[in-house]
């Protein structure tokens, strides 16, 4: 049980409440950066003369840090392969600098590899992360990568390697769209291509202040419209949320700064009230469920901004909801925790949702409830096992993080999307058409509805009851004649409501829809 009552994690969005967070806390394998032991010291006579300021600061992630990460879960042979990939990358990038002109370029592939190693990705993916810019920026070819590290690493590196401008791709936008098309084609054969690309984009966004303002805005906008939605499609809320905030800072630096200060002021004003609630639930759960942990979600300022703009409400109104995550060991403990929460706080009617019995897309599972505390604070709780939490953060990448329970469901949903991407590719006449189709698919807002048997179906907003029938089964769609929504008969052209309704499709003997 955590006794740190100031611990906070990034807050989830409304449509995927609790699906996202940072990569710290009980639900993640986080590692401390290697450093000197606390007891080590240097005698005054041994203190060296001050040295010139190094080009790389002391906190830059280095090769030995990466090796310590991968040694924790890879075999000696795989660890050696990662090190060989680093040696080749360091050799080929020697003399190259990042955009700030003082940081060696090799720090970038090292950071990309670190992100993937923290997710426990396999040896080929980590090697591809180290080598992902070698064919694009050096004289090393994809064929050389394949020869030294195998076809899988070569495929992953080739998938994320950007194309170059030529007569067929005369503009930067044309190159960007064609490179995206190539990456998605490679992704249909091995989705780890996108994991490397997302980790690559994450580090580039973290160092975006080193580029010119025009490029900064262009990259931030591209990240927001393309890579944020791609991360969401893969169920990887851990990276989606971070890319959202970095994009927001790149596009609106002044607004993001003002909102950060306003949020800090709000939290200071309400710290005592929030701590009182946190301590009451922490103490109660520690008695009944000793293995539990309680975290306070941080506000997602990107979402707060979007909600303020869309709903025309004030900033403070968006901040007035306290959000708390409860993590336990077993599913049965989730329901026990829900009972404890409801015994302490007054639950709001109609605000309890059970996504454990009926998981959402990408295997997301949780119990959710909204309550009112005695001091008037409205609190939204999300209750999950640690495994559910892992899947909610890592999506399709959870398979490498020792997660098993909902993996097959997660992979099944993702595989359906892969088939849809292949269909887009087959139908598109050129990369522009493919990109337009993908963008339309990515920005569809999902809604959910239940079958009478309790199975949940995901549909785009605006879908009709006929669409729901076909989502259940093709034959059901062919023979549907009418439908009932929560027991009330509706016409087939009616839209599926966005309230988790139960829909019953009534069929006839002969095919009916036109």
Image (cartoon, grey):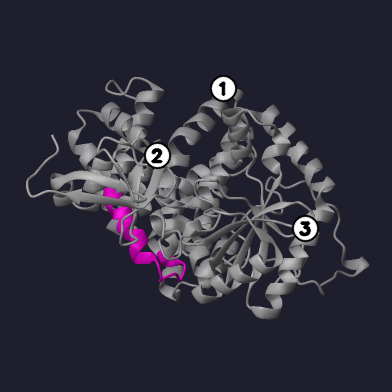
Q: Secondary structure at mark 1?
A: helix
Q: Is residue 52 left or right of residue 214?
A: right
- Circle nearer the viewer, 1 or 2: 1
Residue shown at the point (70%, 38%) measured from the top left: 317
Q: Earlier in the sequence, mark 1 or mark 2?
A: 2
| Residue pointed to by mark 2 | 136
Q: Where the N terminus falls, by quadrant?
A: bottom right
Image position of 275 with respect to 311: above or below: below
Image position of 130 with respect to 278: above or below: above
Q: Which mark is residue 214?
A: 1
- Circle nearer the viewer, 1 or 3: 3
* Residue 229 percent coordinates (x, y): 44, 40
Q: Which residues are magenta?
A: 399-419
- Circle nearer the viewer, 2 or 3: 3
**For the view shown, which residue lies furthest in the left direction?**
510
- Residue 160 found in image quarter: top left
């Amino acid at each position: 049980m955590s006794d740190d009552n100031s611990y906070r994690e990034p807050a989830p969005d409304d449509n995927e409440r609790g699906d996202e967070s940072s990569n710290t806390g009980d639900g993640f394998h986080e590692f401390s950066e290697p450093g000197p032991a606390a007891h080590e010291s240097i005698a005054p006579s041994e203190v060296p003369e001050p040295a010139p300021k190094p080009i790389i600061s002391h906190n830059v992630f280095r090769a030995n840090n990466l090796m310590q990460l991968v040694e924790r879960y890879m075999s000696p042979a795989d660890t050696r392969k990662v090190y060989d990939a680093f040696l080749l990358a360091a050799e080929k990038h020697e003399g190259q600098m990042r955009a700030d002109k003082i940081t060696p370029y090799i720090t970038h592939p090292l950071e990309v590899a670190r992100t993937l190693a923290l997710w426990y990705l396999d040896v080929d993916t980590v090697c591809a992360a180290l080598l992902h810019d070698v064919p694009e920026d050096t004289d090393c070819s994809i064929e050389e990568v394949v020869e030294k590290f195998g076809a899988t690493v070569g495929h992953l590196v080739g998938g994320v390697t950007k194309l170059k401008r030529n007569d067929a791709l005369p503009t930067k936008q044309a190159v960007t769209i064609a490179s995206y098309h190539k990456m998605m084609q490679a992704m249909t054969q091995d989705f780890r291509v996108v994991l490397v690309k997302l980790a690559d984009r994450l580090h580039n966004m973290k160092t975006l202040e080193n580029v010119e303002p025009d490029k900064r805005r262009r990259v931030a906008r591209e990240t927001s419209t393309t890579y944020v939605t791609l991360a969401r499609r893969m169920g990887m809320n851990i990276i989606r949320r971070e890319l959202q905030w970095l994009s927001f800072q790149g596009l609106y630096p002044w607004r993001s700064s003002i909102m950060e200060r306003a949020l800090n002021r709000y939290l200071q004003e309400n710290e005592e009230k929030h701590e009182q609630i946190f301590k009451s639930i922490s103490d109660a759960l520690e008695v009944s469920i000793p293995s539990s942990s309680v975290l306070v979600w941080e506000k997602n300022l990107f979402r707060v901004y979007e909600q303020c703009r869309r709903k025309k409400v004030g900033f403070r109104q968006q901040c007035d909801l306290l959000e708390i995550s409860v993590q336990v060991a077993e599913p049965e403990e989730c329901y026990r925790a829900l009972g404890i929460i409801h015994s302490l706080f007054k639950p709001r009617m109609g605000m309890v949702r059970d996504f454990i019995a009926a998981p959402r897309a990408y295997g997301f599972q949780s119990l959710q409830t909204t309550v009112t505390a005695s001091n008037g604070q409205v609190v939204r709780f999300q209750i999950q096992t640690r495994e559910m939490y892992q899947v909610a953060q890592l999506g399709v990448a959870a398979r490498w993080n020792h997660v098993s329970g909902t993996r097959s469901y997660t992979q099944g949903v993702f595989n359906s999307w892969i088939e849809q991407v292949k269909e887009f590719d087959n139908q598109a006449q050129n990369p522009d058409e493919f990109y337009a189709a993908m963008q339309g698919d990515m920005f569809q807002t999902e809604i959910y509805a239940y079958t009478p048997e309790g199975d949940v179906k995901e549909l785009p907003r605006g879908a009709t009851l006929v669409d729901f029938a076909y989502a259940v089964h093709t034959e059901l769609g062919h023979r549907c004649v009418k439908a009932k929504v929560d027991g009330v008969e509706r016409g087939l052209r009616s839209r599926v409501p966005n309230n988790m309704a139960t829909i019953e499709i009534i069929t006839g003997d002969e095919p009916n829809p036109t």
